[in-house]
Image: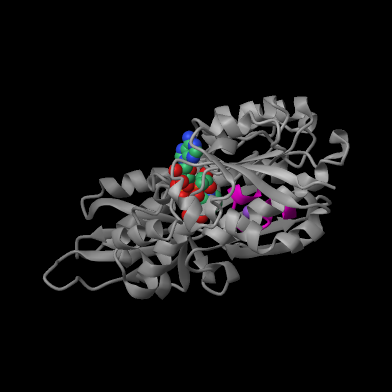
Amino acid sequence: MKAVKVGLLGLGTVGGGTATVLKRNAKEIARRAGRGIEIDFIATLEPERAAELGVENIRLTKDAYEVVNDPDIDIVVELIGGYSPAKELVMQALENGKHVVTANKALIAIHGDEIFAKAQEKGLVVAFEPAVAGGIPIIKALREGLSANSVEWLAGIINGTGNFILTEMRDKGRDFDDVLAEAQALGYAEADPTFDVEGIDAAHKLSILSSIAFGIPLQFDKTYTEGISKITQEDVAYAEELGYRIKHLGVAKRTDKGIEQRVHPTLIPERRLIANVDGVMNAVLVKGDAVGATLYYGAGAGDEATASAVIADIVDVTRALTTDPENRVPHLAFQPDALSDTPVVGMDDIETAYYLRMSAKNEAGVLAEVTRVLGQQGISIEAFIQKEPRKGETDVDIILLTHVVNEGNMNSALEQIAALDVINGEATRIRVESLS
Ligand SMILES: NC(=O)c1ccc[n+]([C@@H]2O[C@H](COP(=O)([O-])OP(=O)(O)OC[C@H]3O[C@@H](n4cnc5c(N)ncnc54)[C@H](O)[C@@H]3O)[C@@H](O)[C@H]2O)c1
Ligand SMILES: N[C@@H](CCO)C(=O)O
Ligand code: NA
């Protein structure tokens, strides 16, 4: 059978890794796919990269529409990133009857419904394994391997850049901006790195995971999103003293009120495996009612690690070319007409434990005032540290760990604590996940 012809859009970190791995492992990949897979046409704004990668003999263009409109291309692989022109190119590829593979989580999280509807109408596949947790086959695990389960919750470290920054801050006391610059140089970060450090990239990925786990529409706009930019060295050290690690997590959980869908820094007990996932590595824990807890671990970003997922999708699509469209795995795991309207719950209704750090005047009775406010909201304390004033300062740090409480009650307590004369400014709040 003749080789499947791939059109590559973008030859950056992931595009370059894809070209390299497809070339290196061509024979083995063909044995798996049932036929050869050949990059036939590449759109790139940096044609000089082609020679560096040893793919200068492949047709090149600066106009991505030439690839999308080329009748010889079977599969379009979108590795440009961002919303536009990525969306228009993907829609045009589908219109032209081409299957699509994309690493673009922003595109799928925001425009996935429209893109999948078009693919459905045309009997085509849109595959996006590289979009979530890089090289880890988490989409496949959730969509296929766990399809017997009612998923109870999932929680994951799903931004490699953010995890790399937190790890370097903890292990080497390095400066935030310095580590971010290194993550950018290594090709881990998004074109706009605020997407990484403010949690937006993780929220894109979480809304995709949540849809696949619970059979609900993509709802990025309802995902609570908080990044790591406010985490200080002190918080990292105090958490450690209490037996926890700070990790940036995406959490999706089924509750009586609906689906919790939230991305924020969390304290995780240090004995948990996921608390020890460091650097650019990602990990996703999924709790199914039948299988129990399962953990998926691997590189969340990087050229060849991400290419691993891109090529796995190309192989899947190659196999799907011979399958009846009616019998293909649905894009979001559940059949498109069987999505449920279970709501995503507001943050006031979630329940977790909390780490609180506040700066207080070094006076008698401060703690009594704080515990009175917490007590009025029904919040009880699990652990407590009070530090001596730092050299040359009079104020003291108070660190509290609470039991599991309602976030609405916690918000009321935090407002009252901020208003106390003995407390300076607002308390820092980091949610705690026991993950059991
Ligand atoms: N870098 C990673 O580790 C990683 C991991 C998973 C997913 N992703 C996703 O993969 C996608 C690509 O990321 P990347 O890190 O490879 O980015 P990148 O910036 O390294 O590469 C993007 C490439 O697209 C090219 N490009 C831009 N506009 C173009 C156009 N109109 N036509 C043709 N080429 C164009 C750029 O010149 C660049 O070479 C993004 O959606 C990103 O979120 C990246
Ligand atoms: N910028 C992303 C790339 C992988 O999706 C990250 O750091 O996780
Ligand atoms: Na993946």
- Please indicate, yes or no, whether residue 275 appears anywhere in the rendered image: yes
Q: Is residue 190 magenta?
A: no
Residue 320, given in percent of the width and then of the height, sits at: 81, 43
Q: Is residue 374 left or right of residue 278?
A: left
Residue sitting nearer the eye, 309 or 286: 309
Q: In which quarter of the image is the C terminus?
A: bottom right
Residue 199, given in percent of the width and then of the height, sits at: 45, 47
Residue 239, given in percent of the width and then of the height, sits at: 41, 68
Q: Does the magenta stretch include residue 134?
A: yes
Residue drawn 58% across the image and 31% down it: 66
User: Is 240 rendered above or below residue 251?
Assistant: below
Residue drawn 74% across the image and 33% down it: 340
Q: Outermost residue, left direction?
A: 392
Give the magenta part as a residue range.
129-142
Residue drawn 64% across the image and 51% down it: 310
Residue sitting nearer the eye, 216 or 390: 216
User: Is 395 rendered above or below residue 118?
Assistant: below
